[in-house]
Image (cartoon, rainbow, N blue to C red):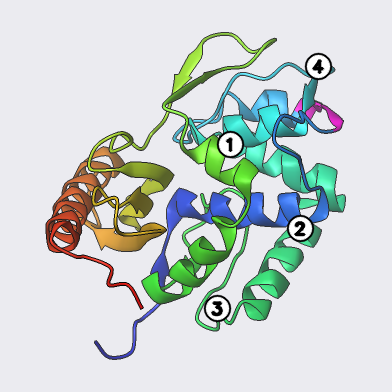
Amino acid sequence: SGVQEPVPIASVTKVMTAYVVLHDHPLRAQDSGPGILVDQEAEDEANAVGESTVPLLAGKELGERQLLELMLVPSGNNVARLLARWDAGSEAAFTGKMNRAAAGLGMHRTTYTGASGVEDSTTSTAGDQLLLLEKAMQDSVFCAIVAEPSIVVRGVPGRFANTNTLLGTDGVVGVKTGSSTAAGGALMWAARAVNPRVPGLILGVVLGQATGGEPNAGLAAVLATSRTLIAGAQRTLAGYAVRDS
């Protein structure tokens, strides 16, 4: 309880990036969306040291949905920035959209300074991110993407695994990991109750796990903490029964 202090959130940032892109360019269930031309910057950034990126080739056209998948599943930072430039003309202009969207959702302790989350200056609280998560999970395309355990995208080499290894356990159906030295481990998660009498989703956000160390250690810590929280919630709901009114 008490006031939550904003902390770095790493790649959890990409949920807001997806939220803004889908708000500006909504997709229907099976739509791939408009074609987006990969620019030279996105190709060059694929080799960025110390970042999570995916291999992209300048001049290749990929659909909006494909790029959202590459951003949200393997957490491609270069893809997040490409989407930002496509949507708003520049990452700076897009970041302004992110902050306006955050204000509109009541996320008053959140500051976005980029589209990917690589900047330690992007900070938020678990409570603020929960407000975003509740809204983002109302988009069926977003829900479908974050539930994918792995993806193959035509024209991009390789199969990409979801960084959220909790998928498929204890009813988990998403959503997004984040990890860096400053942020430690961060996770937005969503799970369906194993009790069929309980409707809807269980949502949670865990931030600031094992900060100051290796990003992989932070990721392992937040996954372990979240696994415990989700299992506890499922046990609590297992005995819940909805009474007829």
Q: Is residue 80 visible?
A: yes
> At x 44% / y 68%, what residue is drawn?
130
Q: Which residue is mark 2?
A: 94
* Mark 1 → mark 4, Cα distance in angstroms: 16 Å
* Mark 4 → mark 3, Cα distance in angstroms: 36 Å
**Residue 234 picture quarter:** bottom left
Which residues fall within the magenta stretch?
A: 34-40
Mark 4 or 3 closer to N-term? 4
Mark 1 or 4 closer to N-term? 4
Mark 1 or 3 closer to N-term? 1
**Residue 202 picture quarter:** bottom left
Q: Which residue is mark 1?
A: 71
Residue in the foreground of this view, choosing between 153 and 136? 136
* Mark 2 → mark 3, Cα distance in angstroms: 17 Å
The tag on residue 60 is 4
> At x 52% / y 52%, what residue is drawn?
117
